[in-house]
Image: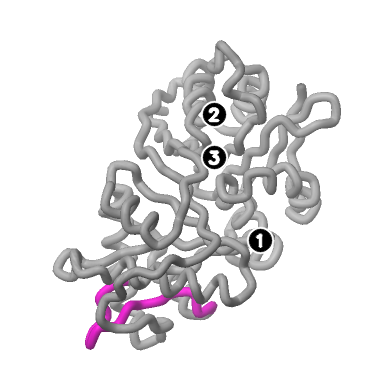
Amino acid sequence: MKVYRYQDANQFYDRVKDYLLRDEALHNRLLVLCHSLIHNPEAFEEKPLLATVEAEGDIVAVAMRTPSRNLLLSKIQDFGAIEAMSDDKSLRVLAQNLHLTENSLAQVNGPNAEAKAFAETWRSLTSQSYEIKMALRAFQLKQVEKISQATGELRQATERDRELLIDWFEAFVLEALGIAATNTERTVDRHLQRGTAYLWQDETPVSMACHVGITPNGAAISLVYTPPEYRGKGYASSCVAALSQILLSRGHKYCFLFTDLANPTSNRIYQAIGYQSVGDLYDCSFFGE
C-alpha cells in the first residue's frame, strides 16, 4: 500500500474522479474543491495537498488538505468490515506519509468511521489529541417538494447587500462552528462577483443561502442563515427550496448540503423540502502541538 501525492490538480482529478463519484453526495466537498482548484486557482494562496492511497493499482482512499490545514478524507470501500478500524493499514500509511511534512493538522472531516479512525491514528503518531467537534449528515435532493411558502421571494444578493452579508457570514460561522470567521470580506466579495449569494426578501432581507460549488452532477448549498429575530416563520425553508429549484433548473441533477445533527430543526426542514440522507460524517478537531 502506497501514498501518491499530486502537484497538478487536473491530473489528480482525472485519477480520483471515478472513485469519488461512487458516492458523489458524500464526497461533494472533495469534488467541489477539485473543481475550484482547476477553474479558480487564483482563489488559493497555496495549493492544497492532494493524495491517494493505492494498493495494487486501485485507489483505497482519497485525501485533500486545505490551506486551513483541514484534512478532507473520502470513504474507504468496505471499511466497515474491518474489525480493528484504528489499525487499518490505508489510514496508517496515509497518516505516516502526512506526518513527514505536517507537524499538525487542524481538523479531519470524513465519514464517521474513517474520520475517527484517522484521528486515532494521527494521535498515536503525534502529540495532538482530538475531539469530535461536529456530527454531520450529508443530504441529496433530486426534486423539490412543495411546501408552504413564506411571504417574500428569493433574490440574488447585490453589492448593496455587502455589509449585510459580511455580518451574516460572520454570525453563521460563529453560531455553526463556534469560532470567529476569517477572510470574511474576501469570501463575500467572491460570492458577489460570481452571483452565488441569495437572500429571501420579505420587505427586508430575512434569510440567506449560498451556492458554494459544483460537482459533475450536482450543486452544493451552504451558509444557510436566518437572524434570530426572523426565525420560526419558514424563511430558511423557502430560501433553500427556491435556491435548490434554481440550481436544478440549470441542469444539475442533484443538490447537496450538510446539516449539523445537533440541530434537529434544520434536519427536519430540509427533509420536508425533499432532501434525503446519504450518510454521516464527523468533523474531528485536533489540539495540542
* Residue that numbered label 1 is attached to: 217
Q: Residue at x 62, y 20 (%)?
A: 92
Q: Which quarter of the figure has residue 206?
A: bottom left
Query: What mark, if any, has residue 57 been given in the picture?
Result: none
Q: Can residue 167 be seen in the rendering of this structure?
A: no
Relative placement, left or right, of 42 versus 284 is right
Q: Can residue 76 be seen in the rendering of this structure?
A: yes
Find out whether residue 200 is within the magenta segment.
yes
Who is closer to the viewer here, 74 or 237?
237
Q: How far apart in space, not on screen, are marks 3 and 1 (Cα)?
A: 24 Å
Who is closer to the viewer here, 280 or 174?
280
Dot placed on the residue nearer the N-terminal end, 2 or 1: 2
Kind of residue indicated by mark 2: Glu
Kind of residue indicated by mark 3: Leu
- Magenta residues? 194-207
Identify the element where label 3 is drawn.
Answer: strand
* Residue that numbered label 2 is attached to: 114
* Residue that numbered label 3 is attached to: 71
